[in-house]
Image (cartoon, rainbow, N blue to C red):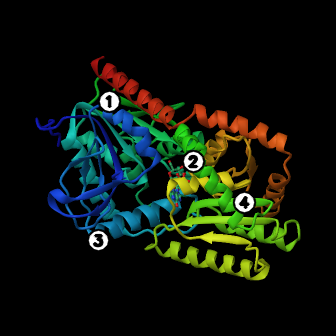
Amino acid sequence: DRVAAPSAVRYDMIVVSNRLPVDYVGGTGAEIEWKTSPGGLVTALEPVMRAADGAWIGWAGVADREFDAFEHDGIELIPVPLSADEVADYYEGFSNDTLWPLYHDVIAPPTFHREWWDAYVRVNRRFAEAAARAAAEDAVVWVQDYQLQLVPRMLREQRPDLVIGFFNHIPFPAYGIYSQLPWRRQVVDGLLGADVIGFQRAADAGNFTRAVRRLFGYTTRGTVIEVPDDTVGGTGTRRVVARHFPISIDAAGFEEIARRPEVQERARQIREELGDPKTVMLGVDRLDYTKGIRHRIKAFGELLRDGRLSVEDATLVQVASPSRERVETYRQLRDEIELMVGRLNGDQSTLGHQAVAYLHHGYPREEMVALYLAADVMLVTALRDGMNLVAKEYVACRFDNDGALVLSEFTGASDELRQAILVNPHDIEGLKDAMMGAVEMPPKERARRMRSLRKRVRENDVAHWSASFLEALTGSGKLAAGLSEQ
Ligand code: GDG
């Protein structure tokens, strides 16, 4: 049933995401300490939120704890509580072991459990209710990502006055794969509660629109879907826009860090610590089976074995930051990667030169930037990736116009970064040739490509991303109002 906006609500702009942009440090009551977790989304939305009397709704990252709403660094944060069981079923289960593998083209087999689905529905309802309570009349609510796909519909049912946007950060799969989901109708219907549904690539938006036609038979024209809605006057349909808005990074922010003398000094030091090899190759990923880390290590190992590279001349630095360690598939992947790295180093390393420097840690952003500056060749070999921000960060940091980017065609970033060396990471021979091409690329060609990549990332930064999404959203809000007045 619909509820009118209670009088206590005041936010004109609300972002809803699984996690709040802060980490709990410690303490209780008024003494609670929070630390901002730096991320692209915060950078992108902070200015918008400040300008628009905004609030952010999300889980604080601690199970079985309730926190009051609070302000941090000038942003109003509204925590949504999750029990330990809900973290296991809604988050680690349905989000990360059902939807994540399914939406990444079943690289790993998705697990379907009805109890996980029940928890997903329950938690999505809790987020929707929190947003319904906090939103002012006619407010804009922007829901983020695959953990919260039911929120748009649930929210619209309670608050038809709101303008609702949704952005999917990961791919949306082809119908043949998507249709495996036992709850495929409920999820698509959940998303169709939004006015604008954003995707990373045009192909993702196309897959979604086809799923809508297959499951519901609604009329679609280009990016517009006609969704029957008896609360709308006139045609009795609501127009939902589904299109791509490729996400990006704070390019100027990364470049600023890269230009700091101490970061450049650290980059030189990293090369020295690696034994000053001619070529430093770099991979930076969350330890995830979508990222193609094994393919990259295999290709590098074969180049050493075949003598096309030598361990004195080339080192691969692989940062694999810990991720989802309570999900079994991720534990297995870690074992596989560590076995591969151990074998490769055992076979190829010398006392003075290590083949792979494998780092299972998270690092501060400054250290990441120093690594980007130290790397001659950046390897992004994802098997499926919504966008891949690492590729864009590498480019943004290379103000020296040096460095070569090897980039998988299966990343969203490859739609834009056409001057990278594009690869199919499943084709190990092709990948090896591309890596050698990057190592041997003449400096002039490297600079030409890097200049063009940098231009692209500078122009389409994350501020551009959020502005274009919000423009589409508020434009469509007016459109919907206009339609209902007809
Ligand atoms: C999802 C989608 C989409 C990694 N290790 C460390 C660290 N990172 C940072 C990177 C980068 C971010 O994490 C990873 O972003 P990606 O885009 O590469 O990948 P996902 O985490 O899978 O993100 C993806 C993204 O959402 C946005 O829509 O692009 O396709 O899967 O920023 O630099 N940062 C620090 N230390 C680390 O150890 N500081």
Q: Position of residue 227 (x, y in %)?
A: 39, 35
**Residue sticking out furthest to the right:** 307
Does mark 2's beta carbon lie closer than 8 Å to ligand 1?
yes
159 in relation to 39, above or below: above
Quadrant in which the N terminus is drawn: top left
How much space separates mark 2 and mark 3, taking CA atoms? 31 Å
Foreground tag (2 vs 3): 2
Q: Around disc 3, counting alpha carbons within 10 Å, would you say few (fewer than 14), some (14 to 19), or many (20 or more)?
A: some
Secondary structure at badge 2 equals loop
First reached walking from the N terminus: tag 2 or tag 1 = 1
Q: Position of residue 81 (x, y in %)?
A: 24, 60
Amino acid carrying label 2: it is Met
Instruction: Quickly name the residue at label 2.
Output: 387
Does mark 3's beta carbon lie closer than 8 Å to ligand 1?
no
Instruction: Quickly name the residue at label 4.
Output: 281
First reached walking from the N terminus: tag 2 or tag 4 = 4
Which disc is residue 51 wearing? 1
Quadrant in which the C terminus is drawn: top left
Does mark 4's beta carbon lie closer than 8 Å to ligand 1?
no
Amino acid carrying label 1: it is Ala
Whether residue 228 is visible: no
Secondary structure at badge 3 equals helix
Amino acid carrying label 4: it is Met
Foreground tag (3 vs 4): 4
How much space separates mark 3 and mark 4, taking CA atoms? 41 Å
Q: Is residue 27 left or right of residue 387?
A: left
The residue nearer to you, when weighing 430 against 117, is 430
The residue nearer to you, when weighing 305 against 199, is 305
Instruction: Quickly name the residue at label 3.
Output: 85
Marks counted in the figure total 4
Q: Position of residue 354 (x, y in %)?
A: 73, 74
Foreground tag (1 vs 3): 1
